Image: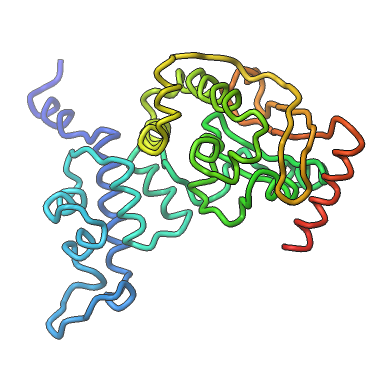
Amino acid sequence: MLTTTQYETAARQPTEADVRRTELAAFLRSRRERITPEQVGLVRGARRRTPGLRREEVAQLAAVGVTWYTWLEQARDIQVSPQVLDAIARALRMDRVERSHLFALAGTPDPAPNGPCPTVTPAYQALLRQLEPIPACVQNSRYDILAYNRSYARLLCDLDALPRQDRNCMLLAFTNEEWRASMDDLPRVTRSMAAKFRASMAGHLAEPAWKALLKRLEAESAEFRELWERHEVVEHTGHTKFLRNAEVGLLHVEHVNLWLSPGNGHGTGPRLVSYPPVDAETREKLERLHALAGAAS
């Protein structure tokens, strides 16, 4: 039987959540103290004693409440949304590794990671290059385009010109006019993509990154909202399709999915997507597209 003192000692033992909050608070303080006011466009006052930025300055830069941010640095037990963490990471000028560490300490998935996905290994990068002139990319089940070769970069739109957070096939299919113009049968394509996305999302309903993407799609596309309300689901299958490229014309290609994780053939993991030509004419056009992409890079 435990004594009163032992009970009190056990009750004071920090939980994993306590440790995470403490580490998060210390990490934020260290990042805040290393940034000078001049680096973020603020004027350094003559009586400034705080090394780096003040808490209220970080709160101002991140557009969050001063009290709330203070509690975060005090390791208080408060809820932190991915959007707020993103704003703080930007305000504190965190690099890719620091941002990843921030989200890991908060126990929250990053809705817009700035670095390459761990599934895109150097071997996969080499494979993408070796497939050229066949367009190919690596996507996750949320339709984020994680990596791609030069041919794919110019196939449906100018991917290199887009911010990383916009390189998502769902967003492109419903909001990017250049991408939409490349689809020979757009209504069928968008209906199928909405149904595939719903099927994939069943296993990720509580994940912030998925919810953020869904919210953005609903806000930016009336077409998506209408299709989403149908509650249709389909699985990923290979098929032939026609694509209209602005530089080389009509392409007849095979849409091929190669799953990169064992047992993930039903839209639940990363995949390599490629578009091999169906005929010799398309093969010649893909070679021209690849040459144009190489000349532009």
Residue displayed at 18% across by 28% down:
10
Query: In the rendered view of the protein, which quadrant contains the C terminus?
Result: bottom right
Say which of 58 and 12 sits in front: 58
Image quadrant in which the N terminus is located: top left
State whether residue 208 is above or below residue 72: above
In the rendered image, residue 50, in percent from the top left (x then y), is placed at 18, 72
How many numbered marks are there? 0
Q: Work out whether residue 45 or residue 273 is closer to the camera in this orientation and state it.
A: 273
- Which residue appears at 15% of the width and 49% of the height? 68
Q: Position of residue 284 (x, y in %)?
A: 89, 44
Quadrant assignment, res 109: top left
Question: In this orientation, which residue lies closer to the viewer: 133 or 64?
Answer: 133
Is 211 situated above or below 83?
above
Q: Position of residue 70 (x, y in %)?
A: 15, 54
Residue closest to the far bottom: 46
Question: Which residue is painted at 68% across and 29% down in the image?
Answer: 260
Decide if residue 116 is on the left or right side of residue 59.
right
Dividing the picture into quadrants, the one containing residue 13 is top left
